[in-house]
Amino acid sequence: MREVADHLVDALDFFACTVSGSAPGSPTDYRDATRRCLAAFGRPEVLAAEHPFPGGVLRGWVVAGISLSESLVHGWDLATGAGVPYEPDVDVVAAVAALSDGPAPDGAFGDPVPVPADASPLVALLGRLGREVR
């Protein structure tokens, strides 16, 4: 779980730096990385602007969506690993599902796994992104 937590902290720092133009920081923990990320995306002009990103240039709202997806999916990973309940906001799940509808960049996710027909929106999203929910 430590690797997932470290990845999430580093990713949030990367997203904040990407849209703010600042040098990578050294977030002390998840709360620090989250604060930096929210502050960076909290500036309205950031969402419409173009930002350098691996593989090209992306609008800020796309980078924000990737950040939200990382937080949602890795939040589930961490909660599952810790054996604690995970009930993210339904609007967040819907937003990430809408943003992740379509082909994913190579290697971004595992192969989709089957989910029950009556799966919740979160379980359906996780299955599409290669997570097995038990």
Image (cartoon, rainbow, N blue to C red):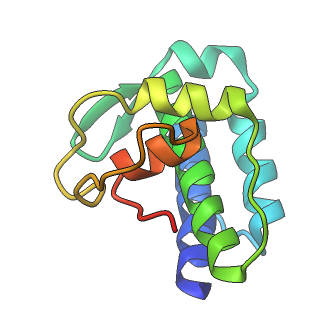
Q: How many marks?
A: 0
Q: Quadrant of the N terminus?
A: bottom right
Residue 96 locus on image (x, y percent)? 52, 33
Q: Residue at left 73%, top 23%?
A: 43
As drawn, which residue projects farthest toward the left?
106
Left or right, residue 50 beside residue 19: left
Q: Is residue 36 visible?
A: yes
**Which residue is more in the foreground, 81 or 70?**
81
**The furthest residue to the bottom:** 2
Direction from residue 80 to residue 101 in the image, left or right: left
Q: Is residue 80 above or below residue 15?
A: below
Image coordinates for residue 118, horizontal then vertical, percent = 50, 37
Say if 103 sits above or below 88 in the image.
above
Q: Is residue 22 visible?
A: no
**In this picture, residue 52 sits left or right of residue 75:** left
- The vertical placement of 50 against 79, above or below, is above
Task: Return the x and y of residue 36 as percentages of the image width and height.
Answer: 75, 49
- Residue 73 screen position, x and y as percent: 54, 54
Q: Quadrant of residue 24?
A: bottom right
Nearest to the observer: residue 101 or residue 44: 101
Which residue is at a point 78% across and 38% down the rendered structure image? Answer: 39
From the viewer's side, name the closer residue of 42 and 77: 77
Q: Is residue 55 left or right of residue 24?
A: left
State the image quarter where residue 12 is shown: bottom right
Q: Residue placed at 26% from the left, 28% from the top? A: 102
